[in-house]
Structure formats: C-alpha cells, structure tokens
C-alpha cells in the first residue's frame, strides 16, 4: 500500500488549482481518475460546448452578411469539421493536464475508479492507497428521469451529444435549463430542427421571467420550437426515430425526433464511493456536506467542486480549491463570502451575479432597480447586436449592489465588473463615478444607474 501526503479523487478543474500550490511544497500527491483527465469542464462541458458555440456564432454571422453589407455566398455547414475542431480543443486541454501530472516528480496519476475502504484509504482496482489529506472532486453526472419506455429508446445526454458523428435531422431536448437552451441554439444554427420540451412554465426557472421570455423569443425567432408546461409521459422507438409523448394542459401530443437529448439536471457522483465506510456525511440529494472551508465531517477530508452542491460551475470549483488552499496555508477565504456569478452562453449571452429581481422582492429589503435595453447602447447598435437588456439591483439602505443581469452582447464579460464591485463592497455611487472606455457596452453600466427606482 502506498501512502501519500495528499490524494485527490477526480481530476476536474479544482484539481489543477490544488496541484498548482501543493506541487511546490514537494509533498507526495496522488491523483485518481477513472475517466478522461480534466473532468466535465474540459471533456464534456465548457471547453467543447463553447467551441461549438463559436462555430454556431460564425455560421449565424455569415448568414447575416447582407445586414453588414457583404455577400458570403451559400453557407454550407461541415458538421464533421465542426466536431473535429471541438475535439482538437478539448483533447488538447485534457492531454496537456495529463502530461503536466505525469511529468511532475511528486505527482502520481493513478488510472481507475476510486472507492473508499476507510476515511483515509482508497482502493483503485488491485491498488490500495492512503493519504493524510483527501480531496473529493468527483463532480456530477446527468440525471436520468423515470420516463415510461426510456430504457428501450436510443437517447443521449450532453456527453453523448458531443460524440455525434452526424448532424441530427430532428433534435428533441427534454429540459429547458442552461444545457438544453445552449444546445438548442447551437444545433439549430448547424441546421437541425430543434424542439425543447420544458416541464415548467418558463425556460430556466431560476431566472426572472423577463430574462427567460427574452431568451425564448430569441430561440423561437431562429426556428427553435419551445413547448412549456409539458410533462413527458412516455417515449418509444420507431426505427431511426423516437416518439415522445407529452401532455400539455391536459392535451396529449407526440413529438418526433431522430435524436433525443436528456438535459434535465445533474446528480453528484457519490453513490459508488462507498462513503458509508468513511463517516463522510451527505445530504438528501447525495451531495457531500461541507463547512465554510470545504471540510467534510471527517477531519482531513475535503469536498470540492460540483460534488459539494455549493456551486455548479468551473469557476466555483476553482474557487473551492482556493478556499481549501487558504485553509491549509493560512488564508481567510470562505464559501459564505463568495458571490454567485455565472453565464449562459446563448447568443446573446446572459451574465448574472448576486440575486435576481424575484429574489430581491422576496428578501424584504428596500430595493432599487435600473434597466436599459441593448438597443439604447451605442456599441451594441454599431455591432448590430441589439437584443436583450441590462438589469441592476441595489440595496436602498446601504447603496450596495445586490445583483445584476446582463442579457446582451458581451453580457458574459461585462457581468464581471459587477462581480468585482460587489466583492470589493463598492457602492453604486462610487461605481457611477467610474470612467470607462468609449465605445463599449461596459461604459453604459454606470449611466444605467441614473434610472434607479424602488421596486
């Protein structure tokens, strides 16, 4: 049995951050990975999907040539080349991380699925390893819903979609969250007929209705069909097609697709870890419970990334690792001091930080809100990208930002300014004084605050 100072179970994005600091200590480190090195982000999430988003955007812009004053001729989509480019990017990232670990003297990459035998002891196949500190970074996987007939149907999840060899003629997506919405627009722009089946009354239920409705309108303008309040009752295979039976307001309808994508949610990868042998606590959904420093209920064992349920993004996973490193090396970062910030990478994208309007109204605080449409932002007009709007929320008693939503060109980048202001405790009055570069989308954010009104 080998003993290490640190054992990292899983190689997602938090692992790279942990290694960045731990390697320099010259402690012995083991990384256990049974799948592709790099975890979800590199292999099935951010890296490949945003590569597809870029291809879809280029196709869309080329088709708008007349608007900008040029002719591009007939646009022919080469799906094979699109997927080849995506694989070049994601495989390069995974291989780079693998080479880094394998070439670092005090890091041992162990291939295989790890299973606990005790709190500090993990079995990987025939190999048994023990560590002083353990970091659980096993992430989540797609949730399979209990739909009648699903076991007999050729369906795919987000990982399966990224391995397609041919463009689906008719892509049906069950689930109108971030994954479903992004893929819907991407594959519609590639040329697929796309239908989203959403059980809730709006897409992306966590978002404000005006945001969700705007995104839906953008999708529908591009030819995506969206079916809301739809309960999928059964599915069946009919040759190369899948029949999806849905119930909408008491009426039944059959939607036909050549590919069925399930994008309903994610579950933590904890069921196969044998946590029962460790004393590590989980909640009712299977996420590992942690304290402010990502420590589990067992001393010396940490849970980072999606598996702890404290965030579902690469940047929160990385921040989890930074919090753990602060705990180990004397810093003061805590989970409670982190502002929730994220992006939806549709076109136009959505950037969001803090609380939403509906959360603000339910908070009991005296809240001010300001909005501005993208059609009133000069740079957006110059780029021909006028869809969407900006919404900023402020605490009337403290003048501090509560949150912001930016649905529009550059929204995924501009939102980081508000995240910075909120982390720094900057009041909206001070932010208003900031001089920003013209002409940009960002420069209109301070001016938008002139329209603050109580909600």
Image (cartoon, grey):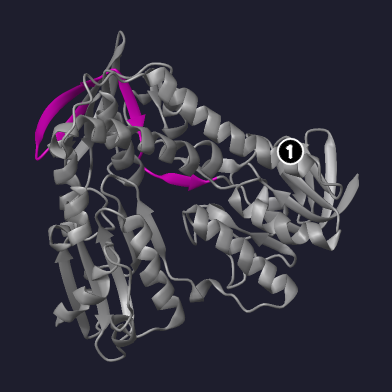
Q: Is residue 172 visible?
A: no
Q: Which residue is farthest top?
A: 239
244 sits left or right of 159 in the view = left
Is residue 47 in the magenta section? no
Task: Tell me if residue 329 comes above or below residue 204 in the rendering.
Answer: below
Q: Which residue is mark 1?
A: 99
Look at the image and tell me in which quarter the C terminus lies. bottom left
Write the start and end of the magenta stretch as one range: 245-268
What residue do we see at 39% from left, 58% from top?
342
Q: Position of residue 268 (x, y in %)?
A: 52, 48
What residue do we see at 18% from left, 62% from top?
377
Q: Position of residue 337 (x, y in %)?
A: 50, 76
Which of these two is toward me, 19 or 262?
Answer: 19
What residue do we see at 18% from left, 60% from top?
378
Is residue 263 in the magenta section? yes
112 sits left or right of 57 in the view = right
Look at the image and tell me in which quarter the N terminus lies. top right
Q: What kind of element bears circle 1?
A: helix
Number of numbered callouts drawn? 1
Which of these two is toward me, 386 or 208?
Answer: 386
Q: Which residue is farthest bottom?
A: 397
Residue 225 is drawn in which quadrant? top left
Q: Position of residue 297 (x, y in %)?
A: 66, 66
Secondary structure mostly seen in magenta is strand
């Amino acid at each position: 049995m080998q003993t290490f100072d640190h054992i990292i179970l899983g190689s997602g994005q938090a692992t790279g951050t942990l290694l960045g600091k731990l390697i320099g200590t010259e402690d012995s480190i083991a990384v256990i990975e049974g799948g592709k090195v790099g975890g979800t982000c590199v292999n099935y999430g951010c890296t490949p999907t945003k590569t597809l988003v870029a291809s879809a955007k280029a196709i869309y812009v080329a088709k708008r040539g007349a608007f900008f004053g040029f002719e591009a001729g007939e646009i022919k989509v080469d799906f094979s080349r699109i997927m080849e480019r995506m694989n070049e990017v994601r495989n390069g990232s995974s291989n780079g991380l693998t080479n880094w670990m394998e070439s670092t003297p005090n890091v041992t990459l162990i291939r295989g699925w790890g299973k606990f035998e005790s709190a500090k002891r993990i079995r990987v196949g025939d190999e048994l390893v023990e560590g002083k500190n353990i970091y659980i970074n096993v992430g989540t996987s797609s949730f399979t819903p209990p739909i009648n007939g699903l076991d007999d149907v050729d369906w795919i999840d987000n990982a399966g979609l990224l391995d397609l060899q041919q463009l689906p003629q008719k892509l049906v997506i069950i689930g109108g969250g971030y994954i479903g919405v992004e893929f819907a627009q991407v594959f519609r722009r590639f040329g697929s007929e796309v239908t989203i089946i959403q059980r809730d009354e709006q897409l992306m239920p966590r978002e404000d209705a005006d945001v969700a409705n705007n995104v839906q309108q953008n999708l529908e303008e591009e030819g995506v069909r969206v079916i809301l309040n739809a309960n999928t009752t059964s599915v069946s295979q009919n040759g190369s097609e899948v029949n999806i039976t849905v119930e909408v307001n008491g009426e039944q309808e059959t939607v036909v697709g050549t590919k069925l994508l399930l994008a309903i949610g994610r579950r933590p990868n904890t069921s196969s870890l044998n946590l029962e042998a460790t004393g590590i606590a989980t909640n009712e959904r299977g996420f590992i419970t942690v304290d402010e420093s990502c420590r589990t209920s067992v001393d010396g064992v940490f849970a980072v990334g999606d598996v702890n349920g404290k965030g579902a993004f690469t940047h929160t996973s990385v921040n989890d690792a930074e919090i753990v490193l602060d705990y180990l090396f004397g810093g003061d970062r805590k989970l409670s001091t982190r502002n929730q910030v994220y992006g939806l990478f549709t076109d136009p994208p959505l950037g969001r930080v803090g609380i939403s309007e509906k959360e603000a109204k339910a908070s009991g605080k005296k809240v001010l809100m300001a909005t501005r449409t993208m059609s009133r932002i000069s740079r957006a007009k110059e780029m021909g990208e006028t869809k969407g709007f900006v919404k900023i929320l402020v605490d009337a008693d403290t003048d501090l930002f509560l949150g912001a939503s930016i649905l529009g060109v550059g929204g995924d980048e501009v939102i980081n300014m508000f995240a910075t202001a909120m982390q720094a405790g900057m009041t909206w009055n001070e932010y208003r004084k900031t001089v920003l570069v013209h002409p940009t989308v960002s420069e209109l954010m301070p001016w938008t605050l002139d329209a603050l009104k109580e909600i």
